[in-house]
Image (cartoon, rainbow, N blue to C red):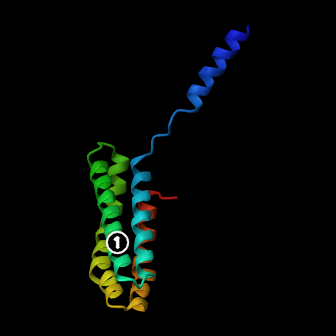
Amino acid sequence: MQKSIAVSFAALLLTAVQPAIAAPADDACAALMEARGHLVAMIGSTDKATQDDLKGKVHAASAKLDGTLAAMMKSYNANDEAKVAAFKPAWEAFKTTREGEIIPNVYAGKIAEAKAIAGGIQAERMKQMKGAMGCK
């Protein structure tokens, strides 16, 4: 009797402790928030070396997100493909504004301008992207 209880308990424990597999949309959301976090930190920094380091981290997280989006489009999952289709236009506009306006303003010491853009159109795009991907 005790042996069967122990075996049942072990089986239950093994099924309960299996690692969770993240959905591609969750990976996309994580990379998006990582890129955003580094950009916010960059805007808040006045040290050029720190800004350079954070810029590299922004680009690395963005590359990770681009890779996830590409994989989602090749997944043969209509739901993933629809999410990417809704997400991608805002993401491309977000990156263009980040690279052409926010980062140059940060390096030029125009922090108020960078914050205005980040809190304006970029915040709207972030909301749109999070909604399209279903970010929590």
- Identify the residue at horizontal 67%, vertical 16% (top origin): 6
> In the image, is 61 to the left or to the right of 116?
left
Relative depth, front residue between 21 and 136:
21
The residue shown at (37%, 55%) is: 83
The image shows residue 54, relative to residue 43, as above or below, that is above
Quarter location, residue 21: top left
Q: Nearer the viewer, residue 135 or 64?
A: 64
Residue at far right of view: 1
Tell me: 93 left or right of 1.
Answer: left
Give the x, y percent position of residue 61. 35, 62
For the point 34% across and 46% down, the residue is 78
The location of residue 127, given as percent across then percent down, is 46, 70
Residue 25 higher or lower than 63, as above or below: above
Answer above or below: position of 31 versus 3. Answer: below
* Crowd tier of the residue under label 1, counting other residues whose Cα lies within 10 Å: few below 14, some 14–19, many 20 or above: few
User: Disc 1 on helix, strand or loop?
Assistant: helix
What is the x, y in percent for residue 5?
Answer: 70, 15
Q: Is residue 5 above or below residue 123?
A: above
